[in-house]
Amino acid sequence: MLNNQKKELNLIDELYKGNETAITEIYHRYGRELLTAAYSHLKDKTEAEKVVLSVLTELWDERAILRISSLKDYLETALKHAVLQSLYQTKFNSLKQDTGNQIFIDK
């Protein structure tokens, strides 16, 4: 177990350094699990792939300001937020179509 933690910490360190092989390794290590989780909520393979790609892209783009202690925990949380955003956007777009692009918010 300590060996896995050390590998993960090394992987996080390489990510912070901008080593592109780190993001590739993260994809190989966690991609399938993330895709399965996203698909279980979205029920759309293409949308699940987009969500996973957005999570990994954001991880790469924001690596300089992120402080990650557990890569798995970070990815699970980021995926949860990305899935919720996707579901919200899908529902919003559906409402727009149903109302002829006119959305009214009561206050």
Image (cartoon, rainbow, N blue to C red):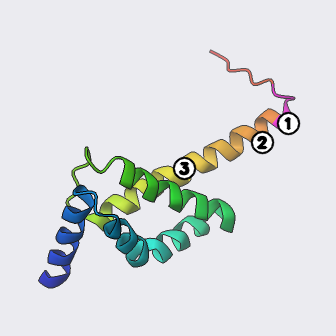
* Residue 2 in the image, given as x and y percentages of width and height: 12, 82
Crowd rating for badge 3 (residues with CA inside 10 Å; few <14, some 14–19, many 20+): some
Q: Which residue is mark 1?
A: 98
Residue 101 in the figure: left or right of residue 56: right
Q: Residue at x 38, y 61 (%)?
A: 75
User: Amino acid type of disc 3?
Assistant: Leu
Q: Secondary structure at mark 2?
A: helix
Q: In the image, which disc is placed on residue 94? A: 2
| Whether residue 4 is situated above or below residue 44 in the rendered picture | below
Q: What residue is disc 3 on?
A: 84
**Residues under labels 3 and 2: Cα distance?**
15 Å
Which image quarter is the N terminus in?
bottom left
- Residue 99 on the magenta span: yes
| Three-letter amino acid code of the residue under disc 1 | Asp
Q: Which residues are magenta?
A: 97-101
**Residue 77 position in % (x across, y down):** 38, 56
Residue 23 is a magenta residue: no
> Tag 2: residue type?
Ser
List x then y, in percent, for residue 70: 24, 64
